[in-house]
Image (tube, rainbow, N blue to C red):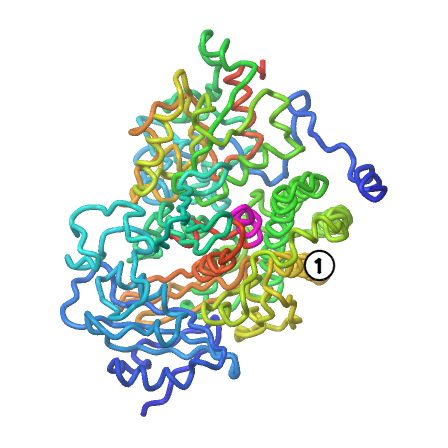
């Protein structure tokens, strides 16, 4: 017993002060991309051949990066002329799919749920997580939110075992054909009103597996999505930031 | 009789140099190699899934030979129906099911012929189970093993489980609390990786390799990179190999420590559960310090690594690792000294050594049964220079798996410190020549769960005509099923966490 207390003392208090204090991330962390439009020359469509997921394209006279497809590759080959670099800004979650088509302007970060839903979920949001073809990296960094570092419970958010106890789904993975039915059943078992969160490039567009015949290229054609969290996988802070934004706790 | 073609780990052989044996001659050559503790590393149909096949198939089998520490490579013709190898050598059981599902070949007399991942047949229109070959099969739709009797009940779990975890379906045949049989049916995470790679390497191939199993990103990417380097006759320098090993060992640490937390949580021993959940994150953050990604994305690339460790980062890493090691030790000491914890671990979920051997359990799960299943020891690559001591348990129970993990944690920490001390100059990224044509390349990496095997076959243009990925979970799920025999159903979570197998690594 004494050794348990001694160890408790030694391990210390570890809950991160986020969101009161900004998190300290690796200097090499790859967050919100920075686009150097000056390097994007007219007539050049190299990006359309190079990016592994087709995240970058030239639209009109400027380059547009689809954050829903972007895997934040360390050796981003999307633009062979080096127009894409990464900042360490982890805040990436948005409400609308269109907001992920990013041209370098300020990202339209997620807004709070509408008043009525917020009144219901604002102080207690129970989520059921469904892994639908995910590689377990997204799942792992969702799981991390439950550790004492993030202590998700202090925001009133909790992952629950049954969809019947849930206010919404947090989906990871590209929705493999073999998980489509189970995902829809889980959705139907969740009582309305309910929200859906697409976490990770796979759940948004299919990610690295985009256009595989065995997947559904993400959630968009399957369920109505309220929050998109880009990343491969998204940092736990990116997910938490998104969750707090829809609950109006990030103002 | 022709000589058997033998290669080392991370080597290639020209396809034309592997004699194409008739099936019967293959069996004759295979028989003396089996039954001596050798491993069936891979067995697959080598035809490209995108070519129409008329007549016989071509099967490639790789046997890991323990005494010579190399790989025997066989190529043989395979008729559309052939006598199953599983009855003689159970290690073939899943490989034969996989071949049946992918190409519609029938292993006659296979004792457990069921679908593996529930997809349409890749070739032709012959479905072994008589399903409509033009429609996507229904996942989980197969005959399950059933025990009959008045007091027998069946418990079905999944695909959607209670926690934040990947999907899979488990069926328990129970007599009261006692589990008579557990059948595991997977395939829910199937993304078709092996076929996506055909004709490649494509721009997305690297990203797909890193996401075969997200908790083994470094392991799988390293195997893929070594395959590419072998095919391009490229040798990376020692510095670069050391950096990659640091990534691989950090992956091992993060997963083992995280699983200690999960084991402790299932036992209800909260101190270790809460400490380890956090400490796992510290190891992931160390990986992120090197490459910006907690899961080692970008740490390994064919030709080297995209990142380097300068003296400043090196000392930061060493300090952080020493500090984290102290916290890890504290959390694990509590765990292993608590009688009520040990009481739950010891004698629970035993896999007998003979079963482990027959099923070819790999890595940590095999070593917990007292077997030497460390591929770094058994199949050193042509350039390996490190010695790895045998770290194994005895009884094959949950305790043994936890104990082996603890040994792995200590050894991984030591390896990282050693490698960090040796890093001097910056490892560079070098261009690798395109893959050579008509070759077979093999790479095995000892990931945290066990042996990660990648095999590439190239066509006359040097493109992949077939790519085979074998995650350690491919072998070890059968181990979990065996661990549950005659065990209480309430011990399932504990047994499951002690293996912590990958669904997506199995499903591909």
Question: Badge 1 local density, few (<14 within 10 Å), some, or many (20+)?
Answer: some
Q: Residue furthest top?
A: A115
Image coords of residue A157 (percent x, y): 56, 23
* Residue B496 on the magenta segment: yes
Position of residue B459 in the picture relative to residue B428 (left or right) = left
Circle 1 marks a residue in which chain?
B
In the image, is residue A128 above or below residue B239? above
Position of residue A12 in the picture relative to residue B366 (left or right) = right
Evaluate whether residue B425 shows in this view.
no
Evaluate whether residue B56 shows in this view.
yes
Q: Secondary structure at mark 1?
A: helix
Magenta span: chief secondary structure:
helix
Q: Residue at x 53, y 57 (%)?
A: B429
Image coords of residue B134 (percent x, y): 15, 49
Image coords of residue B279 (percent x, y): 68, 43
Q: Residue at x 30, y 29 (%)?
A: A222
Image coords of residue A14 (percent x, y): 73, 33
Which one is nearer the viewer's eye here, B399 or B193?
Answer: B399
Q: Residue furthest front?
A: B150
Which one is nearer the viewer's eye here, B290 or A106?
Answer: B290
Magenta-colored span? B489-498
Total labels: the figure holds 1
Which image quarter holds the N terminus of chain B?
bottom left
Residue that numbered label 1 is attached to: B410
Q: Residue furthest bottom?
A: B1
Q: Residue at x 36, y 41 (%)?
A: A53
Position of residue B39 in the picture relative to residue A53 (left or right) = right
In the image, is residue B6 above or below residue B104? below
* Residue B439 on the magenta segment: no
Q: Residue at x 15, y 57 (%)?
A: B125
Which one is nearer the viewer's eye here, B39 or B345?
Answer: B345
């Amino acid at each position: 017993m004494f050794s348990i207390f001694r160890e408790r003392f030694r391990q210390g208090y570890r809950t991160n002060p986020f969101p009161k204090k900004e998190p300290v991330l690796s200097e090499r962390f790859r967050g919100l991309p920075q686009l150097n439009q000056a390097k994007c020359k007219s007539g050049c469509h190299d990006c359309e051949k190079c990016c592994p997921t087709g995240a970058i394209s030239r639209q009109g006279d400027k380059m547009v990066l689809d954050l829903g497809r972007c895997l934040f590759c360390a050796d981003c080959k999307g633009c062979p002329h080096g127009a894409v670099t990464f900042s360490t800004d982890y805040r990436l979650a948005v409400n609308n799919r269109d907001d992920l088509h990013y041209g370098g302007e300020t990202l339209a970060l997620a807004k709070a749920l509408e008043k009525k839903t917020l009144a219901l979920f604002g102080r207690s949001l129970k989520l059921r997580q469904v892994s639908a073809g995910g590689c377990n990296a997204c799942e792992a960094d969702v799981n991390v939110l439950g550790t004492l570092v993030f202590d998700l419970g202090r925001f009133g958010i909790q992952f629950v075992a049954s969809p019947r106890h849930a206010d919404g789904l947090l989906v990871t993975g590209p929705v493999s054909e073999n998980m489509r039915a189970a995902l829809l059943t889980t959705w139907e078992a969740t009582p309305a009103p309910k929200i859906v969160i697409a976490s990770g490039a796979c759940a948004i567009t299919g990610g690295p597996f985009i256009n595989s015949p065995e997947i559904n290229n993400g959630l968009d054609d399957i369920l109505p999505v309220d929050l998109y969290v880009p990343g491969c996988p998204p940092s736990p802070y990116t997910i938490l930031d998104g969750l707090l934004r829809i609950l109006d706790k990030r103002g | 009789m022709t000589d058997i073609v033998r290669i080392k780990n991370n080597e290639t052989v020209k396809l034309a140099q592997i004699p194409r044996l008739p099936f019967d001659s293959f069996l004759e050559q295979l028989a003396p190699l089996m039954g001596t503790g050798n491993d069936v590393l891979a067995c697959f149909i080598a035809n490209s899934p995108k070519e129409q096949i008329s007549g016989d198939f071509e099967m490639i089998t790789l046997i890991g030979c323990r005494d010579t520490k190399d790989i025997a490579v066989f190529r043989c013709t395979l008729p559309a129906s052939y006598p199953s190898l599983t009855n003689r050598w159970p290690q073939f059981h899943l490989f034969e099911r996989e071949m049946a599902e992918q190409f519609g070949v029938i292993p006659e007399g296979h004792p457990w012929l069921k679908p593996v991942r529930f997809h349409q047949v890749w070739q032709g229109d012959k479905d072994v189970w008589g399903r409509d070959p033009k429609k996507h099969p229904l996942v989980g739709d197969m005959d399950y093993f059933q025990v009959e009797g008045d007091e027998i009940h069946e418990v079905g779990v999944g695909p959607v489980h209670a926690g934040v975890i990947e999907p899979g379906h488990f069926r328990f045949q129970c007599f009261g609390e006692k589990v008579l049989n557990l059948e595991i049916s997977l395939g829910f995470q199937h993304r078709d990786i092996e076929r996506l790679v055909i004709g490649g390497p494509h721009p997305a191939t690297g990203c797909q390799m890193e996401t075969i199993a997200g908790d083994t990103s470094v392991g799988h990417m390293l195997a893929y990179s070594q395959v590419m380097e072998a095919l391009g006759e490229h040798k990376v320098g020692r510095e670069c190999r050391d950096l990659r090993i640091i990534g691989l060992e950090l992956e091992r640490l993060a997963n083992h420590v995280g699983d200690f937390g999960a084991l402790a949580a299932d036992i209800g021993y909260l101190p270790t559960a809460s400490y380890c959940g956090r400490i796992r994150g510290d190891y992931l953050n160390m990986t992120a310090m090197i490459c910006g990604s907690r899961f080692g994305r970008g740490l390994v690339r064919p030709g080297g690594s995209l990142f380097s460790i300068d003296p400043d980062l090196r000392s930061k890493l060493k300090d952080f690792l020493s500090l984290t090691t102290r916290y890890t030790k504290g959390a694990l000491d509590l765990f292993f000294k608590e009688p009520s914890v040990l009481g739950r671990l010891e004698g629970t979920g035993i896999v007998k050594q003979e079963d482990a051997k027959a099923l070819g359990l790999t890595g940590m799960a095999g070593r917990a049964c007292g077997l030497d299943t460390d591929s770094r020891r058994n199949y050193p690559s042509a350039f390996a220079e490190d010695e790895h001591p045998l770290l194994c348990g005895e009884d094959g129970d949950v305790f043994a798996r936890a104990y082996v993990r603890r040994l792995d944690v200590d050894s991984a920490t030591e390896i990282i410190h050693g490698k960090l001390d040796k890093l001097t100059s910056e490892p560079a990224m070098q261009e690798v020549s395109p893959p050579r044509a008509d070759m077979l390349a093999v790479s095995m990496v000892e990931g945290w769960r066990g042996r990660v095997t990648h095999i590439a076959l190239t066509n006359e243009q040097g493109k992949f005509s077939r790519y085979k990925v074998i995650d350690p979970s491919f072998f070890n799920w059968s181990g979990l099923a065996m661990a549950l025999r005659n065990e209480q159903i309430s011990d399932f979570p504990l047994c499951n966490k002690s293996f912590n197998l990958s669904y997506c690594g199995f499903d591909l």
